[in-house]
Amino acid sequence: NESNFKPNQIMSRVRRTFNSASDKYNDNAFLQNEIAKRLSEKLKVISINPENIIDLGSGTGFLSDKTADIFPNASLFCVDFAQQSLKNNSQNLKVCADAYELPFASNSVDFVVSNLMIQWCPDLKTLFNECFRVLKPHGLILFTTFGPETLQELKRSWSVVDNEAHVNDFIDMHDIGDQMIQSGFQSPIMEMEKLTLTYEKVLDLMHDLKGIGAQTVENRSKSLTGKTKFKKMLEMYESYRDNGKIPATYEVIYGHAWKNEIKLGAISLEN
């Protein structure tokens, strides 16, 4: 509902949850680390020799450390708005800042890389405009985010209970690409893969989501009605159990684009 669209309130809530989860984040973020590994493999084939890199939404540093190893001569700025997460990042250049207002001069950065941060930014226009602003001509942005089929089992299980939004909505990769073009990026390349994690029980999944600060947007009512709905959702989710395991699907989107058309050609992001 556009009339209820309040990105500042959303971002404040996201900041609080990531700060509170920072100390235990790495213990619960298997998927985030796995996707960081996959993204780092793509970093190795990029025809770019950056002087300055921003790891946007760097958090505790899953991607930061890998990026530093691949580009040892570059200045790597780890940017995150959750200060507690940055305290657990081992890199030296750490900047606590909002992705919508980056404290970098225009045309000053060669490369922006981001792992699983964009899905928490409801205002993609401002986000990509800001990334475009700080990038130098011929600069590159490379990122991962989640697509709309993420946590589809959880969404469907809740949908049987009521019509309220209990799980975050994620943006389709075509809409992300369209916004990048509107922000000035040249011919963005978007790709997708699906990963499935399995759990012994649904509550283990919910524990993981809370542990990485990625709580669903459910009504946290402690009333009898709230508990009854939650129990019914758990019962519905059981219908997805396969070979004794509870699945949780994640649609992972990989995207990249250059600030200007360059003659190096598109990089390959084949899995």
Image: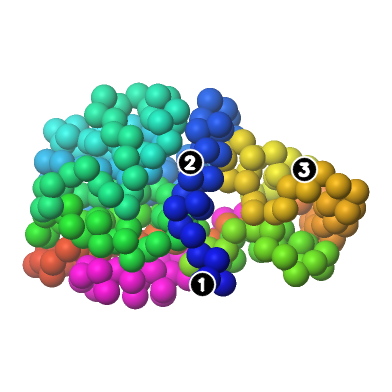
Q: Name the amino acid, label 3.
A: Leu
Asked which colour scheme the image uses, the reply is rainbow
Residue at the disc numbered 2: 15
Asked whether the residues under the numbered discs 2 and 3 touch, taking CB atoms below 8 Å apart as contact, a structural biologist would say: no
In this rendering, which labeled residue sits more in front, label 2 or label 1?
1
In this rendering, which labeled residue sits more in front, label 2 or label 3?
2
In the picture, measured across the screen, residue 166 lies left or right of residue 64, that is right
Give the magenta-colored segment's residue range.
Answer: 172-196
Residue at the disc numbered 1: 2
Q: Residue at x 70, y 54 (%)?
A: 218
Q: Measured from the top left, where is residue 63 in percent x and y?
A: 37, 39
Q: Residue at x 41, y 74 (%)?
A: 174
Q: Residue at x 90, y 48 (%)?
A: 224
Q: Is residue 50 magenta?
A: no
Q: Is residue 180 magenta?
A: yes
Q: Residue at x 15, y 41 (%)?
A: 52
C-alpha distance separating marks 1 and 3? 32 Å
Q: Name the amino acid, label 2.
A: Arg
Figure check: 19 above or below 206: above
Q: Earlier in the sequence, mark 1 or mark 3?
A: 1
Q: Quadrant of the N terminus?
A: bottom right
Q: Measured from the top left, where is residue 182 in percent x and y?
A: 27, 74
State which quadrant residue 168 falls in: bottom right
Q: Measured from the top left, where is residue 72 in percent x and y?
A: 19, 32
Q: Residues within 10 Å of mark 2 (few under 14, many from 20)?
A: many
Q: Quadrant of the C terminus?
A: bottom left
Asked whether the residues under the numbered discs 2 and 1 touch, taking CB atoms below 8 Å apart as contact, a structural biologist would say: no
Q: Is residue 41 visible?
A: no
Q: Name the amino acid, label 1.
A: Glu
Q: Measured from the top left, where is residue 73 in percent x and y?
A: 14, 33
